[in-house]
Image (cartoon, rainbow, N blue to C red):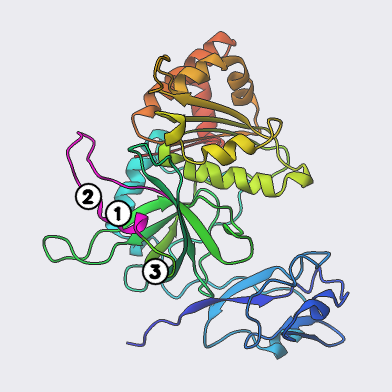
Amino acid sequence: MNAPTELVRQHLIDPEICIRCNTCEETCPIDAITHDSRNYVVKFDVCDACNLCISPCPTGAIDSWRRVGKDSPFSLEEQLGWDSLPEDSEPEEGGAEDIPEDVARITAEATAGQGGTVAPPWSAAHPYLNLYGLARPAIATCSGNFRLTAEDTSSEIHHIVLDFGKVAFPVLEGQSIGIIPPGEDAHGKPHHVRLYSVASPRNGERPGYNNLAITVKRVIEDRDGKPVKGVASNFLCDLGKGDQVKVVGPYGASFLMPNHPGSSLLMICTGTGSAPMRAMTERRRRRIGRKEGGDLMLFFGARTAGELPYFGPLMKLPKDFIDSNLAFSRVADQPKHYVQDLIRARGDRVAEMLKDENCYVYICGLKGMEKGVEEAFQEACRANGMDWNALLPELRAQSRYHVETY
């Protein structure tokens, strides 16, 4: 049996929107771009994906990529003859039948609160799924590992950046990746896959560099407080720059953000459940000048400010960009506040957003939060002349209610 072809990203130029201004060819420092009377094209064997040509392009035609076999890229002759870009090819292996049992089980448990599998928002971008499996994982390199929480807190949460080089691993905000920890378990079997939500937007933690970020909490005790060493979390939190990681996926075709103008996001999260919210917020922040998005409202819970991931960056976001509501449950000499308490306090605004057909709800974090959040929604609706029990099925049917809890 032949080994599967390695997939890589090939840099292409979209002939349908290219205006032949020659900016890209003039910008490229290594002469990787050429043209004829019909098309501008990129030389696969010369381009090193430095991305210096991306920002000067007036139309965005230069920022086009396709997954191809490493040994079978599109030739210059093919590119020169195109009237439009070809469709992205399907992977040689993958599909629902190849999803690891652990991933399927975790996904089913996480999405139970939204009533099972639901469709993504109608305007969401097309997600790629299960491109890499256990038999052929993608190899990523750690390019950054930063502790997010204060050193004097017991909650150690890291922001980890994984670089895929030229390996094609496209993800969208709200998707997850699987990590295969090295080594074997006590029974001599490979460790199970662990899932982590992507914490960076679709164009990467560093735009144009084919990377992504995840948010990882070091596990040192179980939910009963007994000492335990999380296999994947400790492996990831101990990564050094240059260390390699086996990655499978991506997974997730539902918890995706809408793309249509005016769409609003109502986000509720705790702890590392902030990862997809951070990805969606960062996607909107990078496109803030386009004024294409609706309102962002966030309810974010942790024990203290020092244990709240992304607290510092969140505080720097403009108030007119995102309506942030932070709940802390373990601040000395202050009453305990949870996300559901703040939802009740902002009930009028929450009800207004729930009523808006362009508002999409995202809930991510510990499974114990689901009941409290739904009760708070119910109270907010009741106080504003709405029936939550009638509204919830509508939200689910319209793909406006998305839950991932663990």
Span shown in magenta:
215-238
Q: Residues within 10 Å of mark 3 (few under 14, many from 20)?
A: some
Residue furthest left in the image: 187
Quadrant of the image for the N terminus? Answer: bottom left
Residue type pointed to by label 1: Asn
Residue 257 visible in the snapshot: no
Name the secondary structure under disc 2.
Answer: loop
Q: Of callouts 3 and 2, which one flags the residue occurring earlier in the amino acid sequence?
A: 2
Mark 2, residue position: 229
Q: Residue 34, percent across and down?
A: 78, 86
Residue type pointed to by label 3: Asp
Q: Of callouts 1 and 2, which one flags the residue occurring earlier in the amino acid sequence?
A: 2
Mark 1, residue position: 234
| 283 is higher (above) or lower (below) than 377 | below
Number of callouts = 3
Mark 3, residue position: 243
Cβ–Cβ under 8 Å for marks 1 and 2: yes
